[in-house]
Image: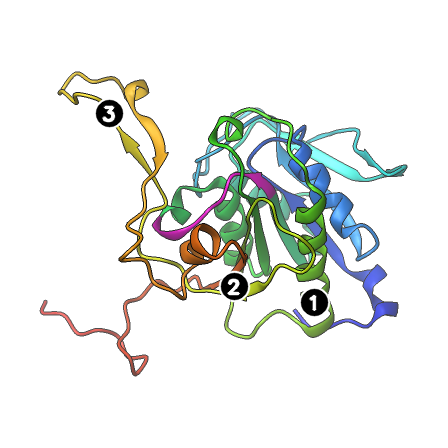
Amino acid sequence: MDGYSHNQMSSILIAVTNDDGIKSPGIRAAVEAVLGLGELVVIAPSSQQTSMGRSLSAKKDDYLKMAEFEVNGEKIRAYHADSTPAFVVMHAFHTIFHDKRPDLLISGINYGENLGSNLTISGTVGAAIQAATMGVPAIALSLQTDMAHHHHYGDVCWKMARHFVRRVIKSVIESSFPKGVDVLNVNIPEGITEQTECRVTCQSRHPYFTTRITEPKHDSRFGDGKCVVDLDHDGLEKDSDIYAIAKDKVVSVTPLRLDMTAKDGHNKVVMVKV
């Protein structure tokens, strides 16, 4: 994605998606944050699709239906389908955007942080990765919230999230998407101000969320598990996304690549016996 001048921004096509559903206040906040930075088109799941990762699942006879979507008095072209986030993106790229792919896709703003080795669970990140596999740079956006809001919309202040989302996306549009990067994973902590640091981080190898089952047995039900934040504070990498959010309370921006090949310090593939 090449850099654009202020006069060229109106020609940029930005797709906006999420995993919390088209009625989520988070996707509305994302649209509010990027109004005026380009032509916006919303493509989102019809309902909550949290933790769907990059799953491609949908009802075979469903399709992208038009939806009313108005923000700050401006009507935004919007579509939704009863599908996982990644499948919404894939299908939209083959249908709505079949003549012209978006210049950028943003996914979020998600209820809840997406950090560390939990990244592949996230439907927010999954949608961004799907766009990247189809040649469109993407930004995943998540706000730290109480876990009670992860599956149910809650009363959340989006002001600072909107501020940093606009800051990051405007910077990317004006200076171009970082070379060699496919997805930017942005996580915004609670209780920040406009002066809060925005830090480039690595993805931690540690999990952020984990599941606990009291008195686990072979017949423990899936619903018996309780999601908790359980961190190895001493083992956390100081340059990681988890450390930035959990310890230093700063905005984390993690560059991601589609290539998951294990490489050594010289960027060569790690040799294994076969």
Q: Position of residue 30 (x, y in %)?
A: 70, 45
Residue range corresponding to the magenta coloring:
109-117
Q: Position of residue 222 (x, y in %)?
A: 28, 21
Number of the label disc, if any, that sits on residue 182:
2
- Answer with mark 2 or mark 1, whichever residue precedes in sequence: 1
Separation of residues labelled 3 and 2 (CA atoms): 36 Å
Left of 74 or right of it: where is 236? Answer: left
Q: Is residue 64 visible?
A: no
Q: Callout 3: 10 Å neighbours few (<14), some, many (20+)?
A: some
| Residue placed most toward the observer, 71 or 143 | 143
Q: Judging from the image, what secondary structure is the residue with disc 2 in?
A: loop
- Is 116 one of the magenta-colored residues? yes
Separation of residues labelled 3 and 1 (CA atoms): 44 Å
Under mark 1, the amino acid is: Ser
Q: Residue at x 46, y 38 (%)?
A: 56
Q: Can you tell which of label 2 and label 1 is closer to the viewer? A: 1
Residue identified by numbered label 3: 213
- Answer with mark 3 or mark 2, whichever residue precedes in sequence: 2
Q: Judging from the image, what secondary structure is the residue with disc 3 in?
A: loop
Tag 3 near tag 2, CB within 8 Å: no
Residue identified by numbered label 1: 171
Left of 100 or right of it: where is 46? Answer: left
Q: Residue at x 65, y 69 (%)?
A: 1
Q: Position of residue 36 (x, y in %)?
A: 84, 54
Separation of residues labelled 2 and 1 (CA atoms): 16 Å
Image quadrant holding the C terminus, namely bottom left
